[in-house]
Image: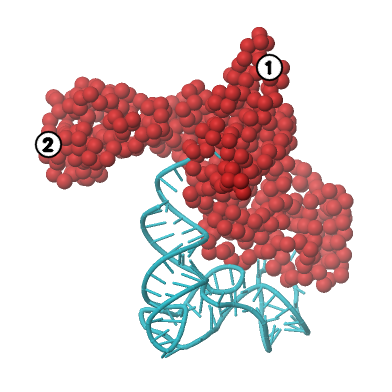
Chain colours: A red, B cyan
Amino acid sequence: MRWTQAFIPTLREAPAEADAPSHQLLLRAGYIRQVAAGLYAHLFLARKSMLKISQIVREEMNRIGAQEFQLPALNPAELWKESGRWDKVDVIFKFKDRNQHDLCLGITHEEEMTNIARGELHSYKQLPQIWYQIQEKFRDEPRPKSGLLRLRQFLMKDSYSFDLDEAGLDVSYQKHYSAYSNIFDRCKLNYRIAEAYSGMMGGSFSHEFMAPTEAGEDFIAVCDCGYAANLERAQSQAPPVEDLPEAGGPEPFPTPGQKTIPQLVEFTSESPARMIKTLDYVMESRPVVILLRGDHSLSETKLATVLGTNVFRPATPEEALDLHGAHVGSLGPVGLKGVRILADRALEGRKNMITGANQDDTHLRHVTPGRDFDPEYHDLRVAEAGDLCLHCGKPLRVIKVMELGHIFKLGRRYSETMGARVLDENGKEVTLVMGSYGIGIERILSAAAEQNHDADGLFFPRPIAPFEAIITAANMDDAAVREAAERIYTEAREKSVDVLFDDRKERPGVKFKDADLIGVPYRITVGKKKVEQGMAEIFRRSAKQARDVKLQDTVSALKEELDA
RNA sequence: CGGGGCGUAGCGUAGCCUGGUAGCGCGCUUGGUUCGGGACCAAGAGGUCGGAGGUUCAAAUCCUCUCGCCCCGACCA
């Protein structure tokens, strides 16, 4: 492709609405233009990259025996009502057709795929099946952001596995695990595989493929030993705290106006780790009291797992007053009767702590869990950097990440409600065991941009870059330069190098700046002086290293470097 | 949905407080000179100042409503 015939609208300055580096650079490099919040036009370069990424995904999916489908993105409401998601999921775009029938745009395709499975799969002999598609998904996100990071319309590879039993699901899951690893490896991304929140699915679990980047929206806890988990479910041990010796029973002391842990820390000159934080929640109109160490915070995800439901809410100040006989700020567990008390494990075995006295402007000291109140202990807190890894004991780090993919053991969630069953070898009807697996294609592009840029622009890795190389003719008015560049261009195309030829009559500076910007990994520079010596230059964008090669060897040298 | 910010030419912005009908840089067009890191000279084109209503002799500027975009939070199958 010649630049003079391509549409690559580069910008010197980033539009003001862009904040994240990937967003700014994809706009500046002429990849994308915004249509509305969370909606982007993919121009030539973006489309070219996206197709390369999709092809990698396709190849790796095919390699595990997955079969590519293409279902409609426009779905009738019936199946969604059947699965219960029509009313439960709030990001679905819903509307009516001319006959007043409810329709929606697919957020994923569990329902549609399960529907095909229940209609067409009848025998264990047909299993296992893995079906996938690479398709636009639509979600009415409350807050789209950061360019291609969180979109309302995006391209997703979604796949679904159907197995006879859990052992079969394990195999399908493992296949996806390795396919996903291959995909992100081939895209040359820096990523971590993290254990993720499994929801209320009992024994099922999931893994997220996470790219460390500042633009990310999630956090994972990682350990040198290889452990990695989403922060909302990461398990860890708090570093031990030295307790004061036990000193009699709970003893009230006045704390006028001291309502928060920081205030109490200031007031008592004691460490927050010596305090017990009391949070009231309400589940099915019954109170639940949550206890945490003063410097810890509650993971509602973990609480949901313990409670077995995600239908709960923080208590109102009035409800807390009712239960404790004191206002928020002086709440504590001592003396509470007939209420479920859940304590985080970091409180187990602690003694001589400080907590609210259930009397306004008063706290208790010398409080010992287990002696002065008797809670259930569970893992309830959000892990923190510096916590100790449960596997190796080393301190955990917390890093910011972008979610690229998620593999999930669904179990019988959809097959049960929608009645997807086959006969096993004994002629007995069994419900299919499913998995579902997703990859955000735009997110691969934006993660790659986040991970491969500098002040001058993008340098995508070869497999996903829109072009493998750009030929920069320093001066198109110089006949020798022009002819040498043309020859290299012709030869590169003959040798199947995906190359962009910057044949514009621009000054060299402009062309170098653009070449640096647009994310092409190699630049072949053809300039007057070098051409006179029979030489050209191969410039590796990521390292900004150049080397001279003989004109006639340029393309073969480039190919060698590309294949290396 | 709550909080904050911003809408002026393709991009970046000044002007708004203190009303007098729009300016700068880049980009774009034409001509010339230049040609290895975003050139220079000259001449041009391009704006319903997001939209509607109001106040006023007069509104980019003041008031009301509205639409859109961004950021933080809530939410996130």
Specify the label residue A124 is tagged with.
Answer: 1
Residue A21 in sight from this viewpoint = no
Chain assignment, label 2:
A
**Residue visible at 75% across and 42% down?**
A564
- For mark 1, give the secondary structure: helix
> Residue A125: x and y, percent?
71, 17
Name the residue nearer the viewer: A522 or A21: A21
Chain assignment, label 1:
A
- Above or below for A177 versus A254: above
Residue A18 in sight from this viewpoint = yes
Q: Nearer the viewer, mark 1 or mark 2?
A: 1
> Residue A21: x and y, percent?
56, 55
- Above or below for A466 versus A65: below
- The amino acid on which the numbered mark 2 sits, given as a three-letter code, is Phe
**How many residues crowd mark 1 within 10 Å: few (<14), some (14–19), many (20+)?**
many
Specify the label residue A550 is tagged with.
Answer: none
- The amino acid on which the numbered mark 1 sits, given as a three-letter code, is Tyr
Residue pushed farthest top?
Answer: A426
* Residue carrying label 2: A253
Name the residue nearer the viewer: A106 or A563: A106
Q: Are marks 1 and 2 in contact (CB under 8 Å)?
A: no
**How many residues crowd mark 2 within 10 Å: few (<14), some (14–19), many (20+)?**
few
Quadrant hosting residue A15: bottom right
* Quadrant that contains the N terminus of chain A: bottom right
> Residue A236: x and y, percent?
41, 29
Q: Which numbered disc flags the more N-terminal residue, 1 or 2?
A: 1
**Residue visible at 24% across and 41% down?**
A317
